[in-house]
Image (cartoon, helix red, strand yellow):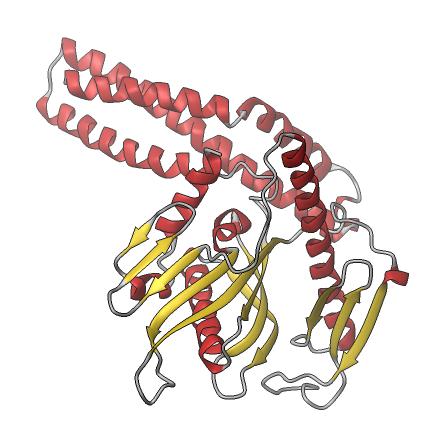
C-alpha cells in the first residue's frame, strides 16, 4: 500500500506541474470568452469564424476537463488509501492498485499534449510531397512517402482531401498536395517536413543495383484567413489549364485547374482536384496564404536567431531521415537520432515514435 501511495503522490505532483505548464486558468477564461461569443446573436452569420471558435472551444473544454478529472481522481484515490489504512480491505486495495496503473498510463497519454507548444500546433495542415532528382526511382519513392503519410492520417482518424497530383510518366508521382484535418494535425506532421532519403535495391533496375533516392515533404499549417497575411491581387499571376486528374465530371474536359504564382516571392501553388475553376482558385489562394504566412514566420524567427548569434544556413539536401532497406533494415532520424529496425512498419504509417521523438527534441531546444 505504501508503494501505491508513493506512486500517487508522484503522480499528483506531475499533474500539478502539468496544469501550470499548460496555463489552464487562462484556458478556462478563454472558454468563457468563446461561450459568450457563441451565445451572441448572429454568431453563425460568419460561418467560417463561427466554426473556428466552436472548434477552439471544444478543444479547450476537452483539455481542461481531462486535467481536472486526473487531478480529482488522484486526490480521490489518495483519500481512499487513507481509509484503507484504517480499515484494510484486500479486494479494495487491489482495485486501487489497478486504477493507479491505469491512471499512470492516462497521464502519460495526456502529457503528450504538453509537447504541442508551437504557435500552429493545433492547426490543420497542408502537405506537399514531391520527388527529387532521379526520375522514376525518385517518383516511386515520393509515392511511397505519400502512402506513409496517408496511412498515418488514417490511423489517427484525420480527414484527407487531395488537392493536386502530378503522376510520374512510368511510375510514382512527381508531386501531390493534400490537406489534412483533425486534432493537432500540424503538431504531429511537422516532424515530416524536410528531405527523406531511401536506400534500396531498385525494382526498376534489371541489374538489381542498390540506389539512393530523395524526395521532399513540405508541411505547412493551414492558417485561417483572418490570421493569414493579406495578398495583393496585383502580385499574382493566375493561369488556368486542363486538369490531369483521374477523370470525372468536368475533369479533363475543361480548363478547371488553376496555378497561382506570387510574383514577389516566386511561390507557386496549383490545384486541379476540385470540380470547378472557382473552387480550385479558392483552394489555391488558401494554400498560398498559408505558405506566405509560414515564410513570414520563418523570416522573423531567422532574424531572431541572427540577433542571438545562432544563425545557421539552411541548405537543401540535408535529409532529416534515412530509410535503408538494403543491405540492412533501418530508419534513422538525423535530428533526434531516433531509430527503428522496422522500415516496413514505418512506411505503413507507424510514425508515432518519430513524432514523439521530434516533439521532445524540439521542446528541449
Q: Is residue 74 above or below residue 314?
A: above
Q: Give the quadrant of residue 344.
A: bottom left
| Coordinates of residue 232 in the picture (x, y in percent) | 87, 57
Q: Is residue 192 above or below residue 145?
A: above
Rendered residue at 35%/49% (across/down): 353
| Coordinates of residue 195 in the picture (x, y in percent) | 50, 60
Q: Is residue 352 left or right of residue 259?
A: left
| Coordinates of residue 172 in the picture (x, y in percent) | 48, 80
Q: Is residue 297 above or below residue 285?
A: above
| Coordinates of residue 9 in the picture (x, y in percent) | 28, 17
Rendered residue at 53%/53% (across/down): 182
Image mark count: 0
> Could you say which is closer to the camera, residue 274 or residue 170?
170
Q: Is residue 3 above or below residue 316?
A: above
Rendered residue at 40%/34% (across/down): 111
Rendered residue at 38%/28% (across/down): 70
> Could you say which is closer to the camera, residue 317 or residue 136?
317
> Could you say which is closer to the camera, residue 137 or residue 318?
318
Amino acid at each position: 500500500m505504501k508503494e501505491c501511495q508513493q506512486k500517487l503522490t508522484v503522480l499528483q505532483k506531475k499533474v500539478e506541474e502539468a496544469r501550470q505548464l499548460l496555463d489552464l486558468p487562462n484556458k478556462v477564461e478563454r472558454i468563457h470568452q468563446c461561450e459568450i461569443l457563441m451565445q451572441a446573436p448572429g454568431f453563425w452569420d460568419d460561418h467560417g469564424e463561427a466554426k473556428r471558435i466552436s472548434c477552439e472551444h471544444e478543444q479547450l473544454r476537452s483539455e481542461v476537463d481531462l486535467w481536472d478529472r486526473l487531478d480529482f481522481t488522484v486526490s480521490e484515490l489518495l483519500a481512499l488509501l487513507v481509509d484503507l489504512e484504517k480499515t484494510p480491505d484486500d479486494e479494495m486495495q487491489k482495485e486501487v492498485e489497478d486504477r493507479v496503473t491505469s491512471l499512470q498510463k492516462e497521464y502519460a497519454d495526456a502529457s503528450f499534449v504538453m509537447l504541442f507548444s508551437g504557435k500552429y500546433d493545433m492547426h490543420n495542415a497542408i502537405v506537399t510531397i514531391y520527388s527529387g532528382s532521379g526520375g522514376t526511382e525518385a517518383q516511386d519513392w515520393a509515392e511511397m512517402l505519400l502512402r506513409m503519410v496517408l496511412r498515418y492520417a488514417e490511423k489517427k482518424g484525420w480527414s484527407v482531401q487531395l488537392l493536386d497530383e502530378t503522376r510520374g510518366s512510368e511510375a510514382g508521382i512527381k508531386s501531390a498536395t493534400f490537406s489534412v484535418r483533425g486534432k493537432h494535425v500540424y503538431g504531429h506532421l511537422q516532424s515530416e517536413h524536410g528531405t527523406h532519403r531511401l536506400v534500396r535495391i531498385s525494382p526498376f533496375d534489371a541489374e538489381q543495383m542498390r540506389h539512393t533516392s530523395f524526395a521532399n515533404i513540405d508541411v505547412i499549417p493551414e492558417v485561417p484567413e483572418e490570421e493569414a497575411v493579406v495578398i495583393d491581387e496585383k502580385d499574382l499571376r493566375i493561369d488556368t489549364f486542363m486538369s490531369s486528374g483521374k477523370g470525372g465530371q468536368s475533369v479533363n474536359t475543361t480548363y478547371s485547374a488553376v496555378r497561382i504564382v506570387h510574383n514577389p516571392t516566386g511561390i507557386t501553388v496549383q490545384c486541379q482536384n476540385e470540380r470547378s475553376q472557382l473552387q480550385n482558385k479558392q483552394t489555391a489562394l488558401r494554400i498560398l496564404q498559408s505558405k506566405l504566412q509560414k515564410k513570414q514566420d520563418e523570416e522573423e524567427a531567422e532574424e531572431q536567431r541572427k540577433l542571438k548569434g545562432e544563425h545557421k544556413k539552411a541548405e537543401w539536401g540535408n535529409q532529416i531521415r534515412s530509410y535503408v532497406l538494403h543491405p540492412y533494415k533501418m530508419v534513422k532520424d538525423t535530428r533526434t537520432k531516433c531509430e527503428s529496425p522496422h522500415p516496413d512498419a514505418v512506411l505503413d504509417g507507424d510514425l508515432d515514435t518519430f513524432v514523439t521523438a521530434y516533439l521532445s527534441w524540439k521542446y528541449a531546444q
